[in-house]
Image (cartoon, rainbow, N blue to C red):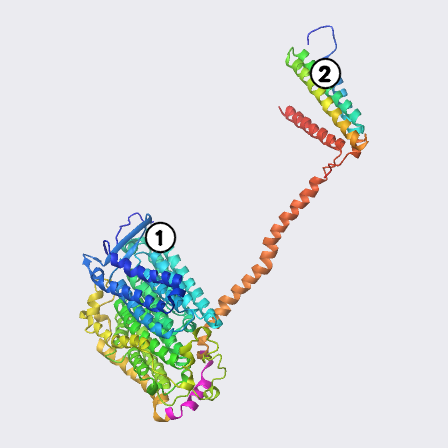
Amino acid sequence: MSPSAFDVPMESYIALSAVIFFLGVIGVIVRRNPLIMLMSIELMFNAANLALITFAKAWVNATGHIFAFLVITVAASEAAIGLAIVVIVFRRSKNVDVDEIATLHG
Amino acid sequence: MSAAITHTVLGIDGSYPLLYLVWLLPLVGAIVLWAFGPQLKSFGGPVGAALVGTAFVAALVSWNDATQTSGALGGAHAPMFSWLPGFAFGLLFDRLALIWTLIITGVGFLIHVYSIGYMAGDRAFARFFAYLNFFVFAMLTLVLSDNFVGLLVGWGLVGLASYFLIGFWSERPTAVAAARKAFVINVFGDVGILFAVIVIVAHVGSIGYGDVFGNAAHAFTSGELFIVCIALFVGCAAKSAQVPLHTWLPDAMEGPTPVSALIHAATMVTAGVYLIARCAPLWTASAEARELVGVIGALTALAGAILGIAQWDIKRILAYSTMSQIGYMIMGVGVGAFSAGVLHFFTHAFFKAELFLGAGIVIHNLANEQDVRRMGGLRKQMPFAFIAILVGVLAICGVPGFSGYFSKDAVLYGTLQHGHPWLYAVGVVTAGITAYYMFRLLFVTFFGQFRGNVDPSDLGIRHPELAGIADPAERLGHEGDEHEHAGKEHGTHAPAWIMSAPVAALIPFSIGIGWLAFGGAASPWQTFFAPVFPAAPATAEAAAPIPELFSGIIVLVVVAAGFALAYLRYGTRGALADSVARLRAETVRMPAILVNAYYFDAAIDAIIVKPATALGRFFGNVVDPVVIDGGVREVAHSATWFGHFFRSFQTGLVRGYALYLVFGVACFVVYYAVIGSGR
């Protein structure tokens, strides 16, 4: 890692990324509000972005930056579709608890 | 497979259109009669008879084709097509096939003509002739084939035709049972031949007779050759009613009498004799096979003759005599006296057909009565049938001058020449028994008083329905206008010319045909067959301990003794006057072992049928429901179980799915961590 403005070790970025990611995971698993779950998913996307940027910078490789843009795009579309689903489900069942929406159970 | 297989064909190649005519005319008849039987009505019989008659004429015209010789080859060979290397099919018409073809078509023609009278008024008149024609075709396929596979095909078709004909009166449960029994036993024999064919193909690589016989010496070890011969003989024994596969023949008498004459006397049952004669080179090379077949033949001759004593059904007596005579033939060809065995077939075909057709006239005129105890005194009412049967009896007993005398003596002396004095002794004793039961038949049926109006119980007949007593109501298929007025109250009537003419035609042959073999080695018969059969190992006249004339006298003395015994018991004035009481006493005292035919049926039932049934029941009640059905059921159950199992994961809870996802990712991470640490 070249000495630069951020003189923080790479491990810290990765650790932060992992922490945010697991916060997202826990959010998806534990919370029952679909909006919170979508936000948690956004958290995981951004944790991944942080890791990508970190590695790109560490190894002076542009691939990471490009992938970060890609992930942002995917996250945007995911948010759009996810919010649309949530709105439709809410219209149908007046319910914001995902555990109550289990009509696809086997 | 031996590398050095030399390719040979028996017979001289060429195109023989007449041969195809002989072979296929009966098939054409069968198809036409099958397809257009209802339209042909009463013309079905003449059409069938005419086609077989034409085939006979065509066979006679091709006489020179069969007898032509060129070097070691003899006869006509018409190649048809080759299926695979070694599997070439064609027709072979040599002297042996000629004799059989002439008997099949000639005697077959006479029986067709006879059937026109015998079966008149039957509901399925044309179908009967379709079956008869089909039978003739099947038999010709068997005889004219130039290879073992064609032979096997003919062999199977003959069994099928026999099944059709025995069960012709399918309204009678006994006829159906007899047909099934005959078919099953015959198929058992077919399997034997199939096995032999497989062994032959494995060792020789060809199915042609010429290839097999030409290479038998180096392609087989003596043990393998023995196995081939025995496997072939299993087929012979089943088809030719040899012990212990003979039990179907007496039951086969359920068929119409012309069928008994055609199939179970003249032709089909001699297929085994043909096969052994055809495979003479194999038998010549295997002393063990000769020994075994000779012994079985002698055993059958004796066993059949003894059973002939105990029968009251005129057709069953003749059936057992057929079995006994075929025993002679098999003994003859078995020990290596091929031309003698074939001669006995040749003469037997005439006199046995005559006996059966004569008996058929009697049965026909007595409204289907078959029990000789209820006949008697028929000499006056049916002089023609009497003469026919008398000639047949004299011939079968071997009275000098009649045909059976020459052939039976030839067979018996043949056993001596080939060094089997014990078989000779059995054969001579059998000849005596034959004379006894045949003259018994003659005396009981044709002499004394007519007993048809005697109460059956006075004759010792306890169960009329089991004793072969005719019950006109039972024989639905045989009812017709002619039979309505043929009842006993009208007495007996003379046979129509259509039935008597074929019998009359057979009489001169029964008497005279044996003279062909008169004169020992120089006789026409021996010269005719000299190029066909290989010289057997022990053919020297010196091998026989007694001269032929002396042997003939011994046989004659024994036959005379048999006749004398029969005369004393049934033929004297006192015996005839007292016949009702005597027959009753004999019926009551008849040993159970003879009445039940040595319990062969019971033994086969106990040894084969019962265990097979038990095995079937085991598979039906245990293996099928538990193992097979159970297996299928368990597969279905396990599918249900797996379904339930996987269903439990499909909670429909999004957060649950997320957890699985995390779990999966964790697994990947751990996996790669482990792989990474492994590096």
Q: Is residue B591 magenta?
A: yes
Q: Amino acid at mark 1?
A: Val
Give the magenta-colored segment's residue range.
B576-593
For residue B218, side relative to residue B455 (left or right): left
Marks 1 and 2: which is nearer the front? 2
Q: Residue furthest front?
A: B39
Q: Residues within 10 Å of mark 1 (few under 14, many from 20)?
A: some
Q: Which residue is mark 2?
A: A50
For residue A58, side relative to residue B161 (left or right): right
Residue B202 is situated, as x and y percent measured from the top left of the image, at 36, 51
The C terminus of chain B sits in image quarter: top right
Task: State the CA–CA distance, disc 1 to disc 2.
Answer: 81 Å
**Residue B605 against residue B649 in the figure, above or below:** below
Residue B448 is situated, as x and y percent measured from the top left of the image, at 36, 90
Q: Amino acid at mark 2?
A: Leu
Residue B73 is situated, as x and y percent measured from the top left of the image, at 21, 57
Q: Residue B422: in sight, yes or no?
A: no
Residue at x 74% of width, y 25% of height = A82
Q: Which residue is mark 1?
A: B201
Q: Residue B506: in sight, yes or no?
A: yes
**Residue A61 against residue B267 in the figure, above or below:** above
Most frequent secondary structure within the magenta stretch: helix
Residue at x 29% of width, y 76% of height = B501
